[in-house]
């Protein structure tokens, strides 16, 4: 079948590679793609994942059978519904179900309705500011404030004092994150270690649990400094053992799948559970309606089964008894970022060295090809260097060795990925 993959990051590179390995894939198109994705198919650099009418033309021109959506924006904007109405399979949630990521308030209410463990919360609007202040006073520091809507990963503030929390609440409601913070969700702070669990569901009660991963969000070693899109990831996650994962399935995955069914929320795609382990008990920090980045760069290499079979079955609404087999090897990815990221950084710097190292897979993220075909940087997160090995230690060692052979001006990466869980 002909497949169109939407997106341009490291996640899409990892999905593209896995899709292209399937004998079921006749041709893969990636819109817009990046400087590395053309190795797995054909880039469509001028096609925007958000311009549905133009996409429809591409789907017709290329005889696309299935659309796989990498990032949340097209899903929250309703790409599933747009193409379902036109008879094209889309892997993802309907617009209504995508509100699980598109609105934190919607997600919290969904969890309350289905008794899914998560932090206590109150949603505040400018009209209920006083109630918001009173709720803050009832909580212990630190205070968690979240813009309700999509804010490109920047809409969560964790502040140490009540005074700052009151001020931040006022500023958010006054438009600090534009429309996204017209409503603000105040949450209880949960103390624990986080992990990411991915589920592929067919919208009819069938689901498969994919390898669990942990990402590293802070830019600095020892989890210090500013938040980023993610500086590295490992899979499996040692603390997410059988006992923990049984709790995740029983208390979170099953009620989520059943809740979607009971409420008639059509969902045929990836569910990303951002979880925190609080004293051995999993709680939901957030839902995302897509795969994670950089988690996908460790999850896909560990998936032994044919991804296209699984995606097609999910999009068709029947996973049946298709297996999602996991390789026993561990995987690690380390992200090479532009100097200055997540603040301002330069683009267009030449990338050189060994981009096909024997020990690792180099997934492109923020890269582009210059007019003469040379590879240049084009974003904050530039490359994801993934390795598989019998142990996490060895996978990490391979990625760090491979990184020694890659260069661009200002290149930076964390040297402590995975160290906290080893
Ligand atoms: P989110 O965008 O909801 O995933 O929040 C971003 C990050 O903020 C999460 O990955 C957590 O590290 C942290 N966080 C969010 N909510 C909470 C909470 N209720 N308690 C503790 N940390 C939180
Ligand atoms: N790695 C976290 C995310 O993709 O949102």
Image (cartoon, rainbow, N blue to C red):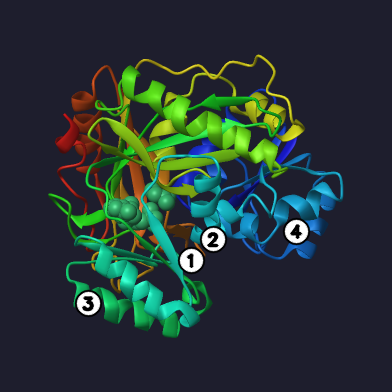
Question: Which mark is nearer the camera, 2 or 4?
Answer: 2
Q: Secondary structure at mark 1?
A: loop
Q: Secondary structure at mark 3?
A: helix
Sequence-first disc among 1 and 2: 2
Residue on which disc 1 sits: 148
Looking at the image, is 345 positioned above or below residue 117? below
**CB at mark 4 closer than 8 A to ligand 2?**
no
Q: CA distance from mark 1 to mark 2?
A: 5 Å
Sequence-first disc among 2 and 4: 4
Residue on which disc 2 sits: 103
Q: Secondary structure at mark 2?
A: loop
Instruction: Specify the farthest residue to the bottom.
Output: 174
- Dot 3 surroundings within 10 Å: few (below 14), some, or many (20 or more)? few
Q: Looking at the rendering, in which quadrant would you find the C terminus?
A: top left
Residue 125 seen: yes
Say which quarter of the image contains residue 315.
top right
Q: Is residue 25 left or right of residue 395?
A: right
Q: CA distance from mark 3 to mark 1?
A: 19 Å
**CB at mark 3 closer than 8 A to ligand 1?**
no
Question: Which mark is nearer the camera, 3 or 4?
Answer: 3
- On residue 250, which mark appears? none
User: Residue sitting at 48 percent across and 76 percent down?
Assistant: 125
Q: Looking at the rendering, in which quadrant would you find the N terminus?
A: top right
Residue on which disc 3 sits: 164
Sequence-first disc among 3 and 1: 1
- On residue 55, which mark appears? 4
User: Residue sitting at 20 percent across and 41 percent down?
Assistant: 417
What percent of the width, then of the height, locates residue 395? 25, 27
- Dot 4 surroundings within 10 Å: few (below 14), some, or many (20 or more)? some
Q: State the residue in front, 229 or 23.
A: 229
Residue 25 seen: no
User: Residue sitting at 55 percent across and 37 percent down?
Assistant: 256
């Amino acid at each position: 079948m002909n497949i169109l993959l939407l997106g341009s990051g490291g996640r899409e590179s990892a999905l593209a590679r896995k899709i292209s390995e399937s004998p079921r894939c006749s041709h893969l198109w990636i819109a817009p793609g990046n400087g590395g994705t053309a190795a797995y198919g054909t880039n469509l650099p001028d096609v925007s994942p958000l311009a549905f009418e133009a996409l429809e033309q591409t789907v017709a021109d290329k005889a696309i059978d299935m659309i796989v959506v990498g990032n949340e924006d097209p899903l929250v904007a309703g790409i599933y519904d747009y193409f379902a109405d036109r008879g094209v399979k889309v892997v993802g949630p309907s617009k209504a179900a995508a509100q699980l990521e598109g609105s934190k308030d919607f997600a919290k209410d969904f969890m309350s309705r289905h008794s899914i463990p998560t932090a206590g919360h109150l949603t505040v609007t400018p009209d209920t500011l006083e109630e918001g202040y009173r709720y803050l006073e009832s909580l212990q520091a630190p205070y968690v404030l979240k813009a309700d809507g999509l804010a490109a990963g920047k809409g969560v503030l964790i502040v140490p004092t009540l005074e700052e929390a009151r001020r931040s609440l006022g500023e958010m409601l006054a438009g600090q994150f534009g429309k996204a913070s017209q409503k603000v969700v105040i949450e209880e702070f949960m103390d624990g270690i986080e992990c990411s669990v991915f589920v592929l569901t067919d919208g009819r009660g069938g689901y498969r649990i994919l390898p669990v991963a942990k990402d590293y969000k802070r830019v600095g070693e020892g989890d210090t400094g500013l938040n980023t899109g993610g500086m590295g990831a490992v899979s499996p996650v040692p603390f997410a053992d059988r006992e923990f994962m049984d709790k995740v399935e029983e208390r979170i995955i099953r009620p989520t799948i059943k809740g979607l069914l009971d409420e008639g929320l059509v969902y045929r795609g990836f569910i990303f559970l951002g979880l925190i382990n609080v004293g051995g008990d999993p709680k939901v920090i957030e839902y995302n309606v897509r795969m994670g980045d950089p988690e996908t760069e460790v999850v896909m290499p560990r998936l032994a089964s044919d991804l296209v079979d699984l995606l097609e079955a999910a999009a068709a609404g029947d996973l049946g008894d298709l297996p999602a087999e996991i390789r026993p090897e561990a995987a690690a990815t380390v992200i090479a970022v532009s100097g200055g990221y997540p603040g301002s950084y330069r683009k267009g710097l030449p990338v050189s060295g060994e981009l096909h190292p024997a020990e690792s897979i180099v997934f492109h993220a923020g890269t582009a090809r210059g007019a003469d075909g040379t590879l240049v940087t084009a974003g904050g997160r530039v490359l994801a260097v993934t390795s598989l090995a019998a142990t996490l230690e060895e996978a990490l060692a391979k990625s760090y060795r491979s990184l020694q052979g890659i260069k661009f001006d200002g290149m930076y990466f964390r040297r402590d990925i995975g160290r906290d869980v080893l």
